[in-house]
Image (tube, rainbow, N blue to C red):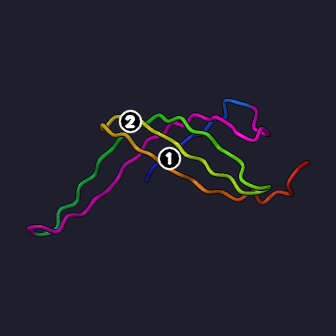
C-alpha cells in the first residue's frame, strides 16, 4: 500500500501543469522458492511530473520518482475529468 500527496506547482487551469508528489508505503512480495516467503519493503519517495491536457477532458501525467529504499520509478497516469469542460 502506497500513499501519495500531490501539489500543483503551476496554475491548475493551464494546458500543462507541473506538480510535485511525495509518498511512502509498504510493498509486499511473495516468493515461492523453498516454501512460502513473504517480504515487506517500506520506502519514501519524492517525484516531479507534468499533467498535460489531451482533448477537453483527458489528461496524461508522466512522473519520475526518486526514493529511499533506494529506487527510481517512472509512472504514467491517464485520467478523465468528470466535470463539465470550461472554455
The residue positioned 45% from the left and 49% from the top of the image is 2
Q: Residues within 10 Å of mark 1 (few under 14, many from 20)?
A: few
User: Could you tell me if the residues under marks 1 and 2 are in contact, i.e. CB atoms within 8 Å?
Assistant: no
- Where is residue 58 shown, x and y percent of the image? 71, 57
The residue positioned 28% from the left and 52% from the top of the image is 40
Instruction: Work out whether 49 lies above or below 29.
Output: above
- Where is residue 87 shown, x and y percent of the image? 91, 48
Tell me the magenta residue range.
11-34
Taking the view exactly as shown, the residue that stands out farthest to the top is 9
Residue receiving disc 2: 67
Q: Nearer the viewer, residue 36 or 65?
A: 65
What is the secondary structure assignment of the residue under circle 2?
A: strand
Taking the view exactly as shown, the residue that stands out farthest to the right is 87
Instruction: Work out whether 62 lies above or below 37.
Output: above
Q: Is residue 28 left or right of residue 18?
A: left
Between disc 1 and disc 2, the foreground one is 2
Q: Quadrant of the N terminus?
A: bottom left
What is the secondary structure assignment of the residue under circle 1?
A: strand
Please check the rendered image and state whether residue 64 is part of the magenta-colored stretch, yes or no.
no
Q: Quadrant of residue 36?
A: bottom left
- Where is residue 72 shown, x and y percent of the image? 37, 40
The residue positioned 66% from the left and 30% from the top of the image is 9
Q: Nearer the viewer, residue 38 or 58?
A: 58
From the image, give the main secondary structure of the stretch colored magenta: strand
Q: Which mark is residue 3?
A: 1
The residue positioned 71% from the left and 53% from the top of the image is 54
Q: Earlier in the sequence, mark 1 or mark 2?
A: 1
Q: Quadrant of residue 68?
A: top left
Q: Residues within 10 Å of mark 2 (few under 14, many from 20)?
A: some
- Where is residue 81 shown, x and y percent of the image? 75, 57
Q: CA distance from mark 1 to mark 2?
A: 13 Å
Q: Is residue 15 left or right of residue 3?
A: right
Amino acid at each position: 500500500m502506497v500513499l501519495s500527496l500531490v501539489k500543483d506547482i503551476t496554475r491548475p487551469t493551464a494546458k500543462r501543469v507541473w506538480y510535485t508528489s511525495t509518498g511512502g508505503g509498504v510493498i509486499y512480495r511473495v516468493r515461492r522458492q523453498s516454501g512460502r516467503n513473504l517480504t515487506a519493503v517500506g520506502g519514501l519517495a519524492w517525484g516531479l511530473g507534468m499533467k498535460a491536457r489531451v482533448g477537453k477532458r483527458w489528461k496524461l501525467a508522466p512522473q519520475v520518482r526518486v526514493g529511499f529504499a533506494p529506487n527510481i520509478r517512472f509512472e504514467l497516469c491517464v485520467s478523465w475529468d468528470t466535470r463539465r469542460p470550461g472554455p
